[in-house]
Amino acid sequence: LMDKLQRLKQGSSSVKEYRQSMELLMMRAGIREEKRTTISLFQSGLNLEIRDKVELLPYRDLNELV
């Protein structure tokens, strides 16, 4: 499951759907990471045009990022 999580990409999903998929995989795998690690993993799977915009925004956690 960890490998699947690391390969997870947004693709044609909305950001909200992508986040839900990521959270489901993390729950199923029993993964609890630091916020910073989770955000980094989330950002790396975002579509490039969204990732570029998000990297410029101030945020403290995944809720603010989404």
Image (tube, grey):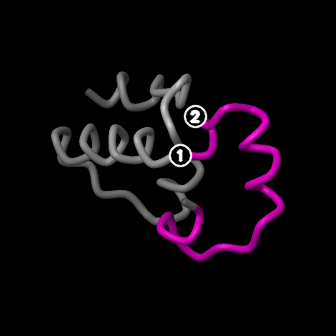
Amino acid bearing label 2: Gly
Is 14 left, or right, of 25 in this rendering?
A: right
Amino acid bearing label 1: Phe
Q: What stretch is highlighted in magenta?
A: 42-65
The residue lying at 55 percent from left, 23 percent from top is: 11
The residue lying at 51 percent from left, 39 percent from top is: 14
Q: Quadrant of the C terminus?
A: bottom right
Residue 45: percent from left, percent from top: 57, 34
Q: Mark 2 packing: few (<14 Cα in 10 Å), some, or many (20+)?
A: some
Secondary structure beneath label 2: helix
Q: How far apart are labels 2 and 1 at the CA level? A: 6 Å
Q: In which quarter of the image is the N terminus?
A: top left
Task: Answer with the quarter of the image where residue 46 lies.
Answer: top right
Question: Is residue 9 depicted above or below 43 in this figure?
Answer: above
Label disc, if present, on residue 42 of the rendered structure: 1
Residue 13: percent from left, percent from top: 48, 31
Compare residues 16 and 1 and report the one nearer the observer: 16
Q: Do the CB atoms of the residues marked 2 and 1 lie less than 8 Å apart?
A: yes
Classified by dominant secondary structure, the portion drawn in magenta counts as: helix
The residue wearing badge 2 is 45
Residue 64 located within the stretch drawn in magenta: yes
The residue lying at 32 percent from left, 31 percent from top is: 2
Task: Answer with the quarter of the image where residue 58 lies.
Answer: bottom right
